Image (cartoon, helix red, strand yellow):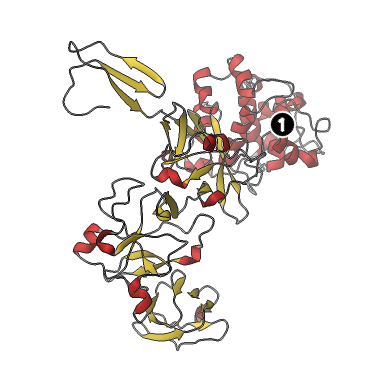
């Protein structure tokens, strides 16, 4: 959108890859080309299933409270019939043969149960004693069994009941299979993936079949026609984003300066990821996704501003062969990185925040403290990390915090505070680099500390507050470490290996130790050792 005064000229708007022209407003005017980011439609399984009318909620609609409720067997059966366009037929069913415990359901529920008894093809055979147990919570295995029946797969013929979950997974139904207590939120997830699956012997999805039968509105069905975003667990236990087939998604650190950094042979190895419609898992923020048009005209999705790629050498779901490649390619972690990496041809890798904004250190800072105050802070705002997820090759233990004089927190790297520069207006800018010959980017491979920190006597502080020692502290050998108690309750600090022990401190009291030997020191508070623990790393 162009804001401000109107331009009297012929205007050409390029929207994604399409072009729209207006008639000339002034003779002789030259067309103007404006690139507009593609619009990406996002939805979650809950949103989509609710808008399709399959999940309707209670009297208040599909609320958070409703989604948190356990799904009963009868409720799951009704929703399945609704999914198949059979609910009204079932409600009008007048057959008398039913399950033994049908009286436990209301009037409409009894009609549903009689219908299910007369239509075993929908998978609701009840218990071996002829009961249905309508108000009992449904288990994932039971739910996925009937979802498979909805797709035309028969228990006992196409799959054994004990192998339900593994067979369902092979058909793309697995995203709610690990739920111990199945909730309505999980039901929405299972319904969405069932609609996106192909019925037995069908070339199209169940969704397309139901749209063809006019059981589901074609326009609303588009909510489920986009690319799925899923999550998988990496070797280090953290979660990362994948597409709907389980293929890993990556970011490229060189994109911090130019989102078109990957070209030609790079693109052959790292194909772009794009869809104009996404179905997101619960807990992933739709606002984190965007899109842009590359210089070559192709569209590409972004996550928190980082363009998304596949890796050509990932052959199957679960492969993460591109993780850490050349120290510039990394998985898209969820939660996302609290600190990331940018790459510059001259400076190499350097620390950035999660959005790609450059981080700096101040060479006048001693270890474990900041001397940047007043006007300095106006130009060099402090950085405070959100979380503790870092790219492969970095150690989360290298990041800690200091408490500034005003009580605010600031993230440190190897004990030294990190800052932004106020003139860096966008990711990839390095306007603070070498400024005054005291401000520099942080190259993790080369950074050992500030000139001041390496020559001045070292001192660091650990605040004991809210029954916590705070984050891991990283110091140089020989550093004096002060413990100060801010709680009303008495606390102390005792090393697990016996290398130090301080007396119990009243509120406001402090004690110091000095650690001369490099290593990792685990410690605890004697009165509260079951939960008050800390770590000091000495380099």
Q: Is residue 296 left or right of residue 393?
A: left
Q: Is residue 153 visible?
A: yes
Q: As displayed, is residue 515 above or below residue 334?
A: below
Q: Quadrant of the N terminus?
A: top left
Q: Is residue 431 left or right of residue 142?
A: left
Which residue lies most toward the bottom here?
A: 503
**Residue 82's spot in the image, x, y percent?**
61, 25
**Residue 160's spot in the image, x, y percent?**
82, 37
**Residue 487's spot in the image, x, y percent?**
38, 77
**Residue 148's spot in the image, x, y percent?**
72, 31
Which residue lies most toward the front here?
A: 346
Q: As displayed, is residue 281 above or below residue 48?
A: below
Q: Is residue 505 visible?
A: no
Crowd class of label 1 (few under 14; some 14 to 19; many from 20; radius 10 Å): many
Q: As displayed, is residue 403 above or below residue 320?
A: below
Residue at 50% across / 29% down in the picture?
A: 275
The one of 58 and 294 positioned closer to us in this rendering: 294
The one of 452 and 400 positioned closer to us in this rendering: 452
Label 1 sits on residue: 148
Residue at 23% across / 17% down in the picture?
A: 30
User: How many numbered discs, if any?
Assistant: 1
User: Residue 339 appears in which quarter of the rendering?
Assistant: bottom left
Q: Is residue 420 left or right of residue 195?
A: left
- In what element is the residue under mark 1? helix
């Amino acid at each position: 959108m162009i804001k401000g005064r109107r331009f009297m000229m012929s205007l050409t708007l390029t929207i994604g890859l399409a072009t729209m022209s207006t008639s000339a407003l002034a003779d002789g005017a030259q067309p103007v080309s404006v690139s507009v980011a593609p619009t990406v439609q996002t939805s979650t399984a809950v949103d989509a299933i609710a808008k399709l009318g399959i999940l309707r909620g209670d009297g208040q609609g599909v609320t958070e409270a409703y989604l948190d409720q356990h799904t009963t067997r009868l409720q799951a059966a009704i929703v399945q019939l609704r999914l198949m366009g059979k609910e009204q037929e079932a409600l009008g069913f007048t057959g008398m043969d039913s399950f033994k415990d049908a009286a436990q359901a209301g009037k409409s529920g009894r009609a549903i149960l009689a219908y299910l008894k007369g239509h075993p093809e929908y998978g609701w055979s009840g218990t071996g004693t002829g009961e249905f147990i309508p108000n009992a919570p449904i288990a994932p295995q039971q739910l996925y069994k009937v979802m498979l029946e909805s797709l035309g797969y028969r228990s006992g013929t196409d799959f054994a009941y004990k192998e339900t979950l593994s067979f369902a997974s092979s058909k793309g139904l697995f995203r709610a299979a690990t739920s111990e207590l199945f909730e309505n939120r999980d039901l929405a997830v299972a319904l969405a993936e069932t609609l996106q699956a192909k019925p037995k012997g069908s070339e199209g999805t169940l969704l397309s079949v139901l749209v063809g039968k006019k059981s589901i509105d074609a326009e609303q069905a588009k909510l489920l026609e986009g690319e799925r975003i899923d999550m998988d667990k990496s070797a280090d236990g953290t979660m990362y984003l994948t597409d709907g087939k389980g293929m890993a998604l990556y970011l490229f650190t060189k994109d911090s300066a130019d989102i078109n950094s990957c070209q030609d042979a790079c693109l052959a190895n790292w194909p772009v990821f794009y869809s104009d419609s996404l179905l997101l898992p619960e807990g992933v923020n739709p606002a984190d996704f965007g899109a842009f048009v590359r210089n070559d005209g192709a569209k590409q999705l972004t996550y928190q501003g980082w363009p998304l790629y596949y890796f050509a050498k990932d052959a199957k779901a679960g492969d993460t062969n591109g993780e850490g490649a050349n120290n510039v390619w990394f998985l898209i972690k969820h939660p996302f990185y609290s600190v990331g990496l940018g790459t510059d041809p001259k400076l190499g890798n350097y620390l950035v925040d999660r959005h790609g904004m450059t981080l700096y250190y101040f060479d006048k800072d001693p270890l474990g403290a900041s001397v940047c105050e007043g006007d300095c802070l106006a130009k060099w705002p402090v950085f405070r990390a959100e979380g503790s997820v870092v790219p492969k090759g970095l150690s989360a233990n290298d990041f800690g915090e200091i408490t500034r004089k005003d009580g605010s927190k600031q993230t440190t790297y190897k004990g030294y505070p990190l800052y932004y520069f106020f003139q860096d207006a966008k990711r990839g800018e390095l306007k603070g680099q070498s400024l005054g010959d005291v401000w520099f980017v942080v190259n993790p491979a080369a950074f050992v500390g500030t000139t001041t920190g390496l020559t001045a006597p070292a001192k660091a502080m650990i605040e004991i507050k809210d029954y916590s020692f705070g984050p891991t502290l990283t110091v140089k050998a020989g550093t004096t470490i002060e413990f100060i108690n801010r709680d009303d309750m008495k606390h102390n600090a005792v090393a697990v290996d016996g290398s130090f022990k301080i007396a119990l401190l009243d509120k406001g009291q402090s004690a110091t130790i000095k650690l001369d030997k490099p290593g990792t020191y685990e410690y605890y508070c004697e009165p509260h050792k079951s939960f008050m623990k800390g770590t000091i790393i000495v380099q």
